[in-house]
Image (cartoon, helix red, strand yellow):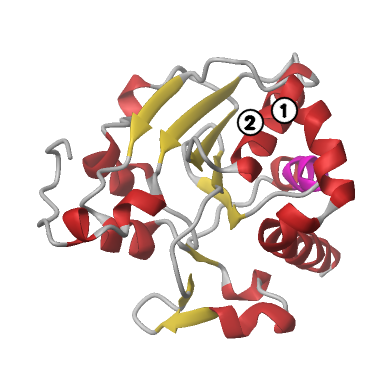
Amino acid sequence: MRKLVVIITIIATAFFCSNVMASSKNVMASSKNVMASSKSEPTLAGTWQLNCLNAYQDIVSTMNPDWIPDQLKNGFEVMEATKEVRLGGSPTVPWLTIYNNDLKPIYHAVGFNSRSDALWQLVIDQNLPTSFAPKLYEIEPYTGVRAVDLADADFTFVEYEAKWCTNCKLVQGALVDFITSHPKLKINHVQIETDTAKMQKKKYKNQACQVGVGS
């Protein structure tokens, strides 16, 4: 129960942080330090196909309903088939999924805040698989990121980001710090460029999503 309360609290903060970032002086001040340390190449990189917006929303923009605090539930819609909740409105980044050494997902959520590293620590300490997260085989057709290309690792962090996304840079910097502070753990960092702004343009929305074909 305590784990669930902590996760809900941090995710609520992260979600609000994602939406008020531009007007938050405290967050912007701390972001300079985080972004300064974000220069690191990911283990593996991919790009979500621009003409596959619906797939991104169905596979990535969903999370565990138990992790959504009451004050945020109006921003999500329940998917009856899977019982997941999908983020309503315009698709966004960053999203982050953590997989264990069996490549089973143990965490998936949107946003970032200064306590995200504490949440990641809690998640890897618990190491409890969840069904409310993208499976690697589900994202492979749209990104080219394959499980077989990953080195054996204790944990794999898959980050969905865009070049224009300020919070994505915060996630990247925090991930570098987190990996550096855990030298005894083998951690893969997978970065998937997901330009949700371009995805919503008519040019791409009118194209058929052809799995495995570059956009």
Mark 1 neighbour density, 10 Å: few (under 14) some (14–19) many (20 or more): some
Locate residue 61, reporting x and y percent: 45, 61
Q: Marks 1 and 2, Cα distance to the nearest angstrom?
A: 8 Å
Q: Nearer the viewer, residue 83 or 44?
A: 44
Q: From what the image shows, is residue 33 above or below residue 133? A: above
Q: Is residue 196 placed above or below 48 in the rendered structure? A: below
Dots 1, 2 in contact, CB < 8 A:
yes
- Residue with the mark numbered 1: 35
Q: Is residue 121 magenta?
A: yes
Query: Tag 1: residue type?
Result: Met
Q: Main secondary structure of the magenta part?
A: helix
Percent coordinates x, y for residue 45 in the rendering: 40, 25
- Specify the quadrant of the image occupied by residue 176: top right
Disc 1, SS: helix
Q: Quadrant of residue 110?
A: bottom right
On screen, residue 87 versus residue 197, left or right, reads: right
Q: Is 58 left, or right, of 24 in this rendering?
A: left
Q: Which residues are magenta?
A: 115-122
- Image coordinates for residue 75, horizontal then vertical, percent: 57, 79
Residue type at mark 2 is Gln
Question: Are there few (<14), some (14-19), or many (20+) residues within 10 Å of tag 2?
Answer: many
Image quadrant where residue 184 sits: top right
Which mark is first along the chain, 2 or 1? 1
The reply to whether the magenta stretch includes residue 60 is no
Identified at 18% across, 54% down, the residue is 203
Quadrant in which the N terminus is drawn: bottom right
Comparing 31 with 46, the one in front is 31
Image quadrant where one finds the C terminus = top left
Residue that carries the numbered disc 2 in the rendered image: 172
Task: Work out whether residue 43 or residue 186 is closer to the camera in this orientation and state it.
Answer: 43
Query: Helix, strand or loop at disc 2?
Result: helix
Q: Residue at x 82, y 55 (%)?
A: 24
